Amino acid sequence: MFITLEGGEGVGKSTQLRLLADALRSHGHDVLATREPGGSPGAEALRNLLLFGDAPLSLRAEILAHFAARFDHVEQVIRPALAAGQIVLCDRFTDSTLAYQGYGRADGDAAVLELIHVLDAQLGLRPDRTFLLEAPREVARQRLAVRKAPTDRYEQADEAFHARVIAGFQAIATHDPQRVRRIGTAQIGVEGVNSLIMKEILAVLSHG
Ligand SMILES: Nc1ncnc2c1ncn2[C@@H]1O[C@H](COP(=O)(O)OP(=O)(O)OP(=O)(O)O)[C@@H](O)[C@H]1O
Ligand SMILES: Cc1cn([C@H]2C[C@H](O)[C@@H](COP(=O)(O)O)O2)c(=O)[nH]c1=O
């Protein structure tokens, strides 16, 4: 089973990934928790370039770099883990490229979305479930302000960019409601979000 967590910065993806991995392990499952961009040595090197490199890439170069990282991660880490029967939990996947590059940078430009879909089709791996965590941007910004992590290129982008990213995620969820579950995180707290996601994952594991 391949599960992804998606959403803007500060909505709680990394927190939920850790809690889900612990909860699934306590139910006896073998779990791989991973992230994008990154998750394999080559992809982590590309993450550093994409998030903290001095030279910003042109849009299509940036998309290809995200997919270069993704192909390496899928081929070297995710597929072998799935083949070994592990549940794979991934913090971000192709939906983030659609939201950040396709909507955030390209404002939904059809040719750019098509490029991303073509690369994704070559990848040939779709998540069984995606949990789209959501919070008003102001709430997410306040959470990030207390978190001590270095600020990356995307976090530094202006509010109009982040508004397009959030609208992009909403469009993805609207087009694929069977796969993508939207969860508002502003009101229900970390544990509440975790139990909603666990309930759904356990249902999928028992009924398919
Ligand atoms: N449901 C929640 N309610 C309140 N605070 C939360 C909730 N979920 C996460 N947080 C807090 O918000 C901060 C950001 O959470 P986290 O790092 O998990 O977000 P993220 O989506 O992974 O962010 P990024 O994409 O920037 O890595 C953390 O300090 C975390 O403890
Ligand atoms: C996979 C992917 C990620 N991004 C952006 C989104 C975030 O701003 C960073 C990753 O940081 P995080 O703290 O690990 O969430 O990268 C992107 O723009 N495109 C992508 O495909």
Image (tube, rainbow, N blue to C red):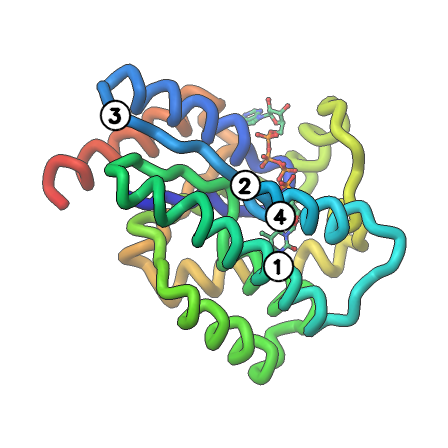
The single residue placed furthest to the top in the displayed view is 26
Quadrant that contains the C terminus: top left
Question: Quadrant of the image for the N terminus?
Answer: top left
Cα separation, mark 1 vs mark 3, equals: 30 Å
- Name the residue beneath numbered marker 2: 39
Dot 4 amino acid type: Gly
Dot 3 corresponds to which residue? 29
Q: Is residue 136 among the parts visible in the rendering?
A: no
In the displayed image of the protein, which residue is found farthest to the right? Answer: 54
Query: Which residue is painted at 54% across and 41% down in the image?
Result: 39
Label 1 element class: helix
Residue 25 seen: yes
Task: Single out the mark in the foreground, 2 or 4.
Answer: 4
Choose between 158 and 59: the one closer to the eye. Answer: 59
Instruction: Report, in whole angstroms, how far the alpha carbon at label 3 lies from the one at label 4.
Output: 27 Å
Name the element at disc 4.
Answer: helix
| Mark 3 or mark 4, whichever is nearer to me | 4
Q: Residue at x 27, y 57 (%)?
A: 178
Res 111 → quadrant: bottom right
